[in-house]
Image (cartoon, rainbow, N blue to C red):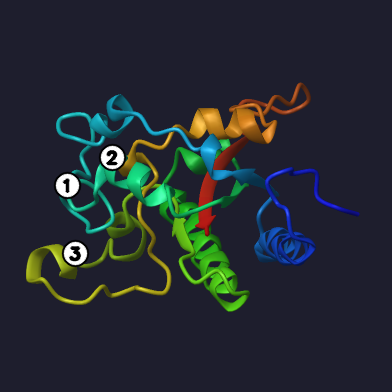
Amino acid sequence: MPLPFPWITQDEDRTILEKLQNHAIELGAESAVLLDTHRIITRDDLAALCKKPGCPNYGIAASCPPYVGGPQALLQDLEHYTHALFFRVHAPKSQVFSAMLPEIMGQVHTIAASLEYKALELGFSKAKAFAGGSCKNIFCQDQPDCQVVAQNGPCRNPTLARPSMSGFGIDVSALATAAGWPMLDKNANATMDDAPMPLYGLVIMG
């Protein structure tokens, strides 16, 4: 059945993108939606939240400000992209607000990175993935520093760590609305601690 997205004009592209969408679910995403990259909104005020004193992770990882280009750089980049795959992972609220958060966010990064590699394999040569949270706290929490930032060296986890959407000012709320998802899932039968919370990742393709 054709995907209901008018900007996808070629049947071959529809088939490839559907494969990528299905692959997101196979990797563990709760849901994944294809969007036109014009639905990606960047906001300077959101990117500003990543600066001190608002964010304690400012400056500690190469995937976060000030080491990423920010909203304007992404807007210029998006001129060369047409498709986006936006996905979400659900986790119980009690786990999100616990010491398990790095493990959960690591799953989001891993799915995003895997989708990026899959998109490259399928022919999208400029595919680029984004996730959430500081990769330093997720993958290198036992290390004294980010090797890229502190030593100008190689990333310790280049196949897993991906840039933070927040650092580029990506309006995740607007993307969730475009995907038809409520920002906070409601479940009348769940306790506060068991209520599922969505965490998001994004892959852009040209």
Q: Quadrant of residue 165?
A: top left
Mark nearer the N terminus (3 vs 2): 2
Task: Name the element at disc 1.
Answer: loop
Dot 3 amino acid type = Cys
In this view, 183 is above or below 10:
above
Dot 2 amino acid type = Gln
Residue at 70% from the left image edge and 58% from the top image edge: 21
Q: Gap between marks 1 and 2, in whole Å?
A: 13 Å
Residue on which disc 3 sits: 146
Q: What x and y, as percent, mark residue 63?
A: 28, 56
Farthest front residue?
A: 9
Residue on which disc 2 sits: 72
Q: Residues within 10 Å of mark 2 (few under 14, many from 20)?
A: some
Dot 1 amino acid type = Pro
Residue at 17% from the left image edge and 47% from the top image edge: 66
Tell which of 100 and 46 is nearer to you: 46
Q: What x and y, as percent, mark residue 108?
A: 52, 55
Q: What x and y, as percent, mark residue 61?
A: 22, 56
Tell which of 77 and 57 is nearer to you: 77
